[in-house]
Amino acid sequence: MTVKVDLAEFLAAYVAEVDEQLANAGAKLLLIEAAGRQGERQPRAVRDLFRAMHTIKGLSSMVGVEAVVSTAHRLETVLRAADRAGGALSPAAVDVLLQSVRVIEQCVRAAEKGAPAPEPPASFLAALEAVSPEDAHAYAASAARSTLEPALDQKLDAFERDLLLKGIHDGRRAVRLDYVPTARRAAQGLNINSVRDRVGALAEIVRVIPISLPSNDSDAGGIAFAMLLLTSRSDEELAAAAGVEPALVRPIFEVGPAPEPAVLALPAEERLPELETSEDAPRRNLLRVDVARVDDAMERLALLIVTRSRLARAIATLAATGADTRELAQIAQENARQLRDLRASILQVRMVPLTEILERIPLMLRALMRTNARQVRLQVEAAGAELDKAVGERIFPAIVHLVRNAVDHGIESPREREQASKRPEGTVLISCSSRSNTRLELAIQDDGRGVDAAVVARRLGVVVPDSDAALLELLCQPGFSTRDEATTTSGRGLGMDIVKRIVVDQLGGELSMQTTPGRGTTFTLKIPLSVAIVDAFVVECAGERFVVPVGGVEEILDVSGERLVFPPRPGMATAVRPVGMVQRRGETLPLYSLATLLGLPYEARPGQRALVIRRAGEPVGFLLDGVRGQQEAVIRPLVDPLVRVSGVSAATDLGDGRPTLVLDLSALVAYGQRRSKGLASGALPALPAQAARGPGGRA
């Protein structure tokens, strides 16, 4: 009896497992490559790679992805030979293996979509077949020329040579001390054994090799000993311990600059796409659950939250009629607590470590360094930080653009850095400097040349900006680039525009920059941990109701008529007051009329309040009629371009069936500044609230 099995149902599990194995393989290969530059081997990493390829081959054979099976089988052959050679892989071999990981990833992505696996480039297959493991220490040794005589040099085995090279890398000196036994030294109690003990107290003895002396040296007896040492002591100290002249202590190697490792050069038409262009990030969940199922649970929770809001309104209506609703209100409060706990649990399931989101950056950075001839060291300080998987997938392209800009535009060439008294190797730091229950703050920092405000202003034909915030606004203009010609990695003027759209427009976060000429640039991203369900303030303005996420509000300020001042503007109508000032704890706070910005009639009334936020580090207030309260809100992004306008990020249902606009106050600040300039010239921009509601007045 034959049983037909539908392998498609195993595809999701196959993709998740192979993604994990590929991510691990990429990390191991980078570890092997770094160790090879230092003359070290990583036999355990090679064995882990072999096991990963064996697992990938078996899984791919089960689901019928033959292209992956054949590639993984070739890699097994290379890795088995490397394991037998003590874990040695040359830089050229590591480069081919990294290309192999990308080929397998392409095949897996195609299988995930149900498409045939692409054929690997012919030159890649030829390079893979030609890979032969060789001593990894050869790369480091090629930068250190031995000064030993050929006969003496041949007596060193690979382990001893590796030990000497590693000692040099760790900051010690590799030296040769020649001891010649004589009658005079014997009378002083010095012989090879006592000298070995005395020198061994000052240095690590790697090898003692007997050497023959010329026959006419009668006092020496025709034999001497060459002691190969690793030490941090001076030549004089070693010579005194051995009872010889300092001239008999000599370096073993002449260390020169390391050569560039060989790379796999593919023809332009056969080059593989960059790793970060893959559509799905590798999965890392111990319990593998399709993201669509978690999204479905979140959607059902959203409906429950809306229903809870409707229940609260119904209880309030009953209470207004005089009905006893105390027990019902108590049940509703308990239900609200349970829903909040359920929301926290589902959000926790959706959380992924930030390090998982960033794990693909090192491979992307490696390719950039080769393309731009830069030396860059990546540091990631994000231990313990987590964020919603959906937020992570959205923010990753922004991080990629910022890292790419740091390498392309910020980090100088090694020669330029040396002329500026900097280390030849630049640094890019990705850190999570602060976090809360609702927001995460990321910083991408480089120690490069910084941003030249005068150059940026000259290319745009504008006045030189007087602050980092104004300079960032110029950098984020669509189509702007500091390069005259576009390259494969930059120059099209899309990077910073994309970063701003992702961070500010899509996620409702905040983007800021600090730059110092000659010292570097830091971009700070403040993003919400989740964008599905948020705690929000329900505010009222000119008889309309709006929602503002709690995470972006610094303070709710009571504004009295005496403290509020509107500066006079000649030629402006009395009711049109886009900008005012208010005193707050001894400082003057710029205040925007929310009604005016939203195209609603403004009317000064007692008891008004202001929401205070920070934009580019500076406090800004929004004048409104009142704050009704705080509650959970289900965010529905406005995806239709016809209703997407500046200052309105989404819509929500507060339980009464009416759509309520979710405001992006940071975007409204920029809108208010533009409108303020427009008012001075008599031009009025489009009104966000009116545009979002449409001709019929409904969202």
Image (spheres, helix red, strand yellow):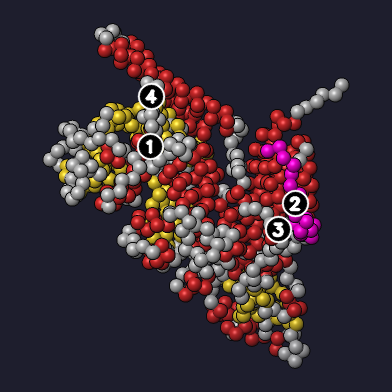
Q: Position of residue 637 (x, y in %)?
A: 45, 35
Residue shown at 20% from the left, 43% from the top: 573
Real-space Cα separation, disc 4 to disc 3, in angstroms? 55 Å
Q: Is residue 332 left or right of residue 170?
A: left
Q: Label 3 is placed on what type of residue?
A: Glu
Residue shown at 39% from the left, 46% from the top: 510
What kind of element bears circle 4?
Answer: loop
Real-space Cα separation, disc 2 to disc 1, in angstroms? 51 Å
Front position among marks 3 and 2: 3
Real-space Cα separation, disc 3 to disc 1, in angstroms? 47 Å
The residue sitting at the bottom extreme is 216
First-in-chain label (3 vs 1): 3
Task: Tell me the quarter of the image containing the N terminus.
Answer: top right
Point out which mark residue 553 bears: none
First-in-chain label (2 vs 4): 2
Point out which mark residue 120 bears: 2
| Contact (Cβ within 8 Å) of mark 3 with mark 1 | no
Front position among marks 3 and 1: 1
Instruction: List the residue tagged with mark 1.
Output: 691
What is the number of callouts on the image? 4
Instruction: List the residue tagged with mark 4.
Output: 658
First-in-chain label (2 vs 1): 2
The residue sitting at the top extreme is 323
Front position among marks 2 and 4: 4
Front position among marks 4 and 1: 1
Real-space Cα separation, disc 3 to disc 2, in angstroms? 12 Å
Real-space Cα separation, disc 4 to disc 1, in angstroms? 17 Å
| Contact (Cβ within 8 Å) of mark 4 with mark 1 | no
What kind of element bears circle 3?
Answer: helix
Point out which mark residue 269 bears: 3
| Contact (Cβ within 8 Å) of mark 2 with mark 4 | no
